[in-house]
Image (cartoon, grey):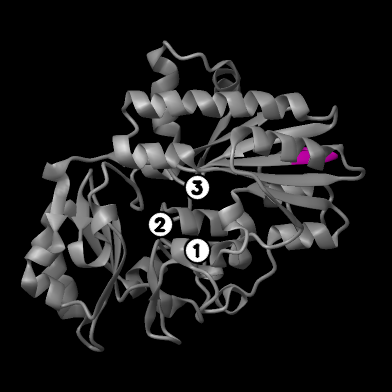
Amino acid sequence: MSSAAAALGVRGCHDTLGVGRADSVVVLLVDGLGMVPLRAALEGGGLQLPHLMEATGAGRVISAPFPSTTPSGLAALGTGLTTGCHGIVGASFRLPETGHTLWPLAWRDEPHPIAVQPEATVLERAAAGGVRVTSVSPRAFESSGLTRAVLRGGDYAGADSLGERVGATARALAAEGRSLVYVYWGDLDKIGHVHGVDSDEWRAELELVEVLVGRLVDQLPTSGRLLLTADHGMVDTDAADRFEIDDDHELRDSAVMLAGEPRMRHVYVRPGAEREVGALWAERLADRAMVLSREQAVAEGWFGSVDPDIADRIGDLVVVASGSTVLASQSVDARTSALRGQHGAATEAEMAIPLLAWG
């Protein structure tokens, strides 16, 4: 988003991705579209994906932020900041000032979104710079805490269907002046979670992404650009991959609070118990996960540059699943733990995302 805004001449934004100058830019975020399953689908044949095939051949692989999860990915896109600076450090995490767990995807009004993420978003900066800014996304997301925290700014065009999103984008591009349009598509992620990325259902949903891309390309003005990227990829798992944290009472009781998601857990412990609890988790999980202290994770750059005021949101321990391990918890997120498609960790399948361009 920062590079798109820079392409439109917004001050303070830098075109680090080489978008080039444009009068209109559409940024399409396809939730869950990792580069690894995308390439597998394209190489497998049998799918009619001419726009995606052409752009992937000339496209680039960029990295999702860590953790490879939707809240952190959308926050990085919307603010242009690292996870450790925008502060949306996972699918769930503890806010030290309240002592409670924040679930960004279920967030509404409390705590106040601007209190959690006060930095100006790219959309706000673009709108202040005279660019016509429009977000085209489901109606249900307009007033969500996550939208108001990391994607606020400009106009919001509620659009649920593919056709509505194409129509709203076309109207935004037809307006006078420079335009920045953000379009969100979440159905591919939903299908991947339920059926896996190596499934006929996921490949069929990818064909709808192709349709959406084609329709958006048709709306581009002569000086317009369409950029497609994602927030994360995904790995397929099965029952044998599940490590049930709650079944190990010593392990579960060692955590004062457990957050994150099944591929990346924030573990909050009693003051002074970090080393002891870290050793316990490392012993129990062995080669199924990497166990890092908060200090180690910050020093090694897992969360990028970290604002000291944000650091305590990160778990005292950061537990990152290896291979296709699922760090399941029936007490924390039973439904999510049972899903086939998972993400949040640091494998290539989860971290490698596309940057594709048309126009």
Q: Secondary structure at mark 3?
A: loop
Of residues 188 and 94, the one nearer the viewer is 188
First reached walking from the N terminus: tag 1 or tag 3: 1
- The location of residue 187, given as percent across then percent down, is 47, 39
* 181 sits left or right of 89 in the view: right
In the rendered structure, find residue 231 and report the number of the disc placed on it: 3
The answer to whether the residues at label 1 and label 2 have Cβ atoms under 8 Å apart is yes
Q: Is residue 169 above or below residue 106?
A: above
- The location of residue 70, given as percent across then percent down, is 46, 53
Report the residue marked by disc 2.
Answer: 67
Report the residue marked by disc 1.
Answer: 83
Identify the image quadrant of the C terminus.
top right
In the rendered structure, find residue 109 and report the number of the disc placed on it: none
Disc 2 marks a residue whose amino acid type is Pro
Residue located at (38% from left, 81% from top): 100
Q: Is residue 219 above or below residue 9?
A: above
Q: Which residues are magenta?
A: 20-25
